[in-house]
Image (tube, rainbow, N blue to C red):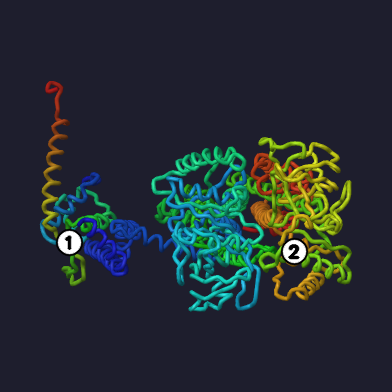
Amino acid sequence: MRLWKRAGAWFEATLGRSRMEREMDAELRFHLEARVADLVCGGMKREEAKRRAQMEFGSFERAKEECRAVRGVNFIDSLVQDVRYSLRMLRKSPGFTCVAVLTLALGIGANTVVFGVVNALLLRPLPVERPSELAFLENNHYGAGQSFPNYQDLRDRNRTFAGLAGYRASPMELEANAGAERIWGYLATGNYFAVLGVKATVGRFFEQSDDLHPGASPYAVLSYSAWLTRFAADPSIVGKTIRINRLPYTVLGVAPKDFHGTELLYWPEVWVPMMMEPQIERQNPWLDNRNTWNTWVIGRLQRNVSSRQAEADLNGIATELARRYPLEDEALHFKLAKPGLVGDLLGDPARAFSLGVLALGGLVLLAACTNLASLLMARATDRQRELAIRLAIGAGRGRVRRQILTETLVLSLAGGGAGFVLAECVSQALNRLRAPIDFPFQYSANPDWRVFLFALVVSIITGGLFGAAPAWRASTAKPDSVIKQAPGSCRGSHLALRDALVVVQVALCSVLVCACLLSLRGLRQSLKMNLGFEPQQVSVVAFELGLAGYSEEQGQAFQKRALQATEQLPGVRSASFSNSLPLSIDQSHTDMIVPADETEIPSNERVSVNAYQVSPQFFATMGTKLLAGRDFSWHDGAKAPQVAIVNVAFGKAVLHTDNPVGKRFRNGPGSPAVEVVGVVEDGKYESLTESRAPAVFWPILQQYNSTTTLEVRSARPATEMVGEMRRAISRLDPELPVYGAGSLGEMLGFAYFPTRAAAIALSAFGVLAIILAATGIHGLVAYTVSRRTHEIGIRMALGARHTQVLRLVLTRTAALLALGSVFGAILVVAMGRVMATIVYEVESRDPLVMIGVFLTMALLGLSASWSPARRATRVDPIVALRYE
Amino acid sequence: MDKQLELLQGTLDMLILKAISLGPLHGYGILLRIQQISKDRLEIQQGSLYPALYRLEDQGWIGSEWGESDNKRKAKYYHLTAAGKRRLQTEAEKWSRMAEVIEGILRARPEEV
C-alpha cells in the first residue's frame, strides 16, 4: 500500500510538476511578503525590510530544491535540467563539441564494426530452437568429418543426445527458371530439421523415414532465398519437380527466411536427403564406406546432460568401434565443439583473430578516451570561474559533479550514436562484400540488439572514463580563490595530469601504428612468398562432369576435347586441367600411403598428403618447377604402369629420401605399387601459413576425376581469356554450367583473405590512432602556448630569440613523445602473442617496424605541434603584455 | 533580548506539529507562533521550514489547502491529520522522557553515584 501511495505521489509530482512549482513559488513569496509587511509595521523602511526579509530567509532556490528533493522529483528534474544545461554548454562551444563527438564516433564506431563481425561469427546463435543445446562432433583423425557408418553407429547407440544429425555441404547442379547452374546444397539426414527444431515456411521437411534406403527419397527442400530468386516465390512450389544433377526431385517445402543451414559460412540453396548421396556425388558413393570421413555431425544434447558426459558416452562407443574396425577407427576419439564454423577447424582461428582485433580496437577506444579526457581537463580549467560561481551561489558539490558527468555522458551518447550509424554504414558495405571465390561464403553482420547494447555500454563506460577526472577536479575547486583570480591566470597541477594523458595516448598510438605496420609487412611478405606456382597470367574455369551425367569414358573424352579447344585459342602459351588447384577451397587428402616394400601402415607414421589429379603440362601451366625426373605424358594412361609426381616434402616424409625419382610406394596396403617419375618444388596447398606439406600428383588419365579445372597460361588479360574459354566449352556442351571462372590471382582470394582482412582492419586502427594522437598533441601544445602567452611575451621583450621560445614550448612535448613511444614499444613486446594471432608470420620485434613506429611518432609530434609552436614565436610582446 | 538558542537537531518537526495542533496555520504563521510561544528564544532558519513542511505532508502527518489570509491574500494553510496527532503525542512523550533522563543525569551529585 505504502509503495503504491509513494508511486502515485511520485507520478503526481512528476506529471503535475509545473503546478507544484507554481504553488511552491506562491507559498514562498507569500512568506516573504508577510515578513516584509511585519517589518514595515515595526517601523522599518520598505527597501530595508525587503533586504532584511530576504537575508533572514536565505537562498530561495535552495529551499525549493530541498522541497523538491522531499517530493522525490529531484532526480528526474535535475537530470532534465542537467541535460538541458549540458546541451546549452555544448552549443556554446561548437568546436569542442564537434571534435569530441567525432573522436568518439570514430572510436566507438570502429569497435562496433569489429564487435558486429565478432557477433555475427561467434556470438549470435544459430536461428534454431534452444541453440545452446547443440554441439558439433569432431574426431582426432579428420577433425570435422565423420564416416557415415560411424555416424549411424553413434546415432543409434548414444544415450546422451536427443538427436544426432549428419550433413555435408556439396556442390549440385540445379535447373531452375534461368537454366542450369552449379550451386551449393546440403545433403542432410532425415532427422536434420527435427533435431534443429526448424519449421518449414511452406510445405514440410523430409523426415526419419527418408533415411532408410539409398536412392529412394528424391526430395528437396529449398532455402527461402532460392525459392525467392530462382523460383519467383512460386506459391505452389510444393509437389513440383525440379532437376538436380539432371535427375528429378520433388520439392517438399521451403526453409524459414533466416535459416541458412548449420554453417555460418556455407549457406546452402537446397537440402537433399543424405540417402541421395550416391545420386548427387555420382562417382563417389560413400554411405557404406567407413573410411570416407565426409559427414559433419551436429547433435542436440539431452536436457541435464553436460558436454563432458556426452563426450564420455561417445568415446565409449569409439572404443568399441576401434576394436571392431581397427583399420579405420584405430584410437578414435571424439570431442564436442561449438557449431557454426565447422567446429574448431575455422572456429579456433576465427575466435583468436577476432578477439585480437577486438583487443586492438579497445586500444583505439582508450586512445579516444584519453584524448577527450585531456580536452575536458583543458575545458574544465577554462570553466573554473563558471563552476566557482555556481558553487558560490549554493550549488552542492555533488550536484556540480553530476552536472559535469551528465555533460560528458551527453557527449559520449552523441558520439556513440554517431559511431553506431557509422558502423551501420560500414557493416552494410561488409555485407555486400563477397569473396571472389566459388563458395557460398556469405554472412550477415546486420547489427542486432547485442551490437546496439555493445555500443550503448561502451558509450556509457567511455563517458564515465573520460568524465571522471574533470568532474572530480571541478568539484574540489575553491570558489573564493578562483573568483578572486584574474581569468586565465590560474596554473595548476592538472598540467601534470594532462602530460600523463599524452604519454598514454602516444603509447597507445605507437602500439596501434606498430600493429598496422606489422600487418602491412605481413601482407607484403605473403604476397611475394613462394607459393610453389606463379599465379600471374593464369586464368581458370571449372566444370563438373559428374553432375552433368557424364560417364567416366565420356568425361575423359570431353576433358581432352575441352583442353584441345582451349589450346587453340589465340595467345595461349600452355594449358592443362586438373581436379583442383592448390590454395583453392577444394582440397583432397590421402593418408594411406606406404613405401612399396612395406605391407602395413605403421600407425605412428600416418602422414596426411595433399593429393591432386593433373593432366600433362600442368606444372608448366602453373609455373611449378620440375626439379628432377619428367612430367606426365599422354601415354601415362590406364594401360601404362602407375606413376606419380611428388614434391620434395613427400620424398622426405614418406620415402625418407632427397631423391625419390624411381622409388615406389603404394596408395594403401594391397594396392599396386606406384613409381615416382618426377619431383616438383614444395608449395602452399591449404593455407599460406602451413610449412612444407607433402603432396602427390596423380596422372588424371590414370585416376579420373569428373571435377575439372581448366588452367591456361597466357599474356592476355584474364577477363578476355576467361570469356573465350567459356565460349569454347559451351560450343562443346551448351548445357554444361561453368563456375569459378577468373584469374588464378582472384581464386586465391580465399587464401589471402585473413591477411588482407588483418591489414585492412589494422591500417584503419593505425590511421585512427594517428589522428587521435595528433589532435591530442596539438591540443596540448596549443594549450601550453595560449596559457604561457604572457610569459613568452615577457621573455621576448627581454630579448629571447625564436629558437629559445621554440625550445621552451617543444622540449616538454618531445620528452612526452619519447616517453610515450618507449612505453609503446614495451607494450608491443608484451603483446607479442596477441599480434601473432592476427598478423601473418611476422616477428613483433621486427626492427624495421620498430624504426618505422618511432619515425612515425616523431613525424607526428613534429607536424602536430608545428602550428601552435609557430604561433608562439609570433607572439607580439606588446600585445601579450597589454592583454588582461 | 536574550541570546537566541539554536534549534536542536530533529525537533523542528515536533514544534511544527505542535504549532499546527493549536489550529490551522500558513507557513509564516507557524514561524510566528513558534517564536511567540518560545518568547523569541528559539532561532528558526526560515529557509528550512518549508522543506520540513513538505516532508511532514509527504509522510501524511499534516494536510494542506489554499485559503485566505487575514489581509485577504491567498495562502497555503496546514492542519494536523489524525496520524499527525498520534505522531505528536508519541514525539512529545519521547521528548519529555528524554528530557527527564538527561536532567537526572545533569543533576546527579557525587553521593548519589
Depth check: give the residue in front, A440 or A862. Answer: A440
Which numbered dot is residue A474? Answer: none
Front in this rendered view, residue A354 or A121: A121
The residue at the point 89 percent across, 46 percent down is A628
What is the quadrant of residue B110 in the picture? top left
A236 w.r.t. A766: above or below: below
Residue A1: percent from left, percent from top: 20, 57
Q: Residue at x 45, y 41 (%)?
A: A309
Q: Residue furthest top?
A: B111
The residue located at (21%, 58%) in the rendering is B57
User: Would you call the spot at circle 1 few (<14 residues within 10 Å), some (14-19), or many (20 or more)?
Assistant: some
Q: Secondary structure at mark 1?
A: strand
In space, the residues marked 2 and 1 are separated at their CA atoms by: 104 Å
Locate residue B15, reporting x and y percent.
17, 51
Q: Which residue is mark 2?
A: A553
- The disc labelled 2 sits on which kind of residue? Glu
Observer-nearest of A669 and B4: A669
Name the residue carrying label 1.
Answer: B63
A489 sits to left or right of A660 = left
Residue A810, percent from left and from top = 73, 48
Q: What's the chain of the residue with tag 2?
A: A
Toward the viewer: A208 or A580? Answer: A208
Report the number of numbered marks: 2
Circles 2 and 1 on the same chain: no
State the image coordinates of residue A238 (x, y, percent, origin top left): 49, 74
Asked whether residue A881 appears in the rendered view, the answer is no
Nearest to viewer (mark 2 / mark 1): 2
Q: Give the left or right position of residue A691, taking residue A173 as reference.
A: right
The answer to whether one can see residue A769 in this image is yes
